[in-house]
Image: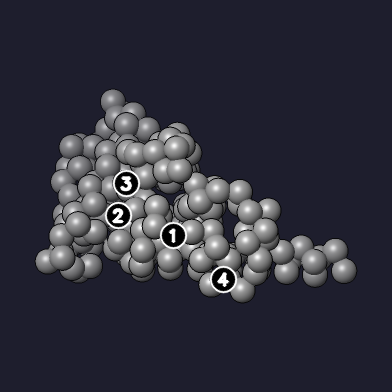
Amino acid sequence: MTGLRDRKKQEMRHRIISEAATLFAEKGIDATTMEEVAAASDVSVGTVYNYFGTKRTLLLAGIGEDTDRMVEAGQAIIETPGDDVVSASKRLVRLYLDDLVSWDKRLLREIFGAAFQRVGGVDLTGELAEMDQKLIEQGVVLLSHFKQRGQLADGVEVYDAAMIIFSVFVLQLFMYMNLDIYEISDLQQQVDRQIELVFAGLRSK
């Protein structure tokens, strides 16, 4: 019975997050009310507040769910990385991109905006940076594997290399969500080319 109750709570929590994401994408975070989220989720306003308290918490919960999903999926690449550091890095970044480009562009802009603004009077920068760090650390694990196999130059710090690759990913995602002429195929090709360029300077000779 306890397992069933917990599962129902998780399903309700996920439904609220999902409906909130739709409303945030359609109206923006500031213009969306908790009452609207409750109505769309078919729960009481009190339930939404009990689970999340504020729109800030609700936004972070949605981003957190997605980050955990990306990390879990990325673990398969970490466990079976293949023989080539460039190919493995492309696969990992492509996995992140494929997840995020499924989001509405406006919601992506809302999330990026939250990283530089105060939402509901609260600075979200620290919480979002911690989520980014999970993806960066996954890159560190992957690159460490290939450095041990001699595919990276001796002087390369794997954390620095993971940060550079993550920066490529973030910059191209930013371009995609802000330029209507920037298609998903453009995003994927740009990221692949830039990762190849990064490794031109990181590979052992």
Give 190 or 91, whichever is nearer the viewer: 190
Mark 4–mark 2 distance (CA, rounded to whole Å): 24 Å
Q: Looking at the image, is mark 3 or mark 4 earlier in the sequence?
A: 4
Front label number (3 vs 1):
1
| Residue 133 vertical placement versus 28 (above, below) | above
**Mark number displayed over residue 58:** none
169 left or right, relative to 22: left
Q: Is residue 68 visible?
A: no
Q: Which residue is mark 3?
A: 113
User: Farthest residue in the left direction?
Assistant: 181
Could you tell me residue 185's position as x and y percent? 20, 69
Specify few, some or many for label 1: CA neighbours under 10 Å numbering under 14, 14-19, or 20 or more.
some
Callout 1: helix, strand or loop?
loop
Callout 3: helix, strand or loop?
helix
Could you tell me residue 57's position as x and y percent? 54, 48
* Quadrant, the N terminus: bottom right
Location of residue 10 by image quarter = bottom right
Determine contact: label 2, label 3, CB under 8 Å: yes
Could you tell me residue 104's position as x and y percent? 33, 66
Specify few, some or many for label 3: CA neighbours under 10 Å numbering under 14, 14-19, or 20 or more.
some
Q: Which residue is mark 4?
A: 39
Mark 2–mark 3 distance (CA, rounded to whole Å): 6 Å
Front label number (2 vs 1):
1
Identified by mark 2, the residue type is Arg
* Quadrant, the C terminus: top left
Q: Which residue is mark 2?
A: 109
Q: Which residue is mark 1?
A: 32
Determine contact: label 4, label 2, CB under 8 Å: no
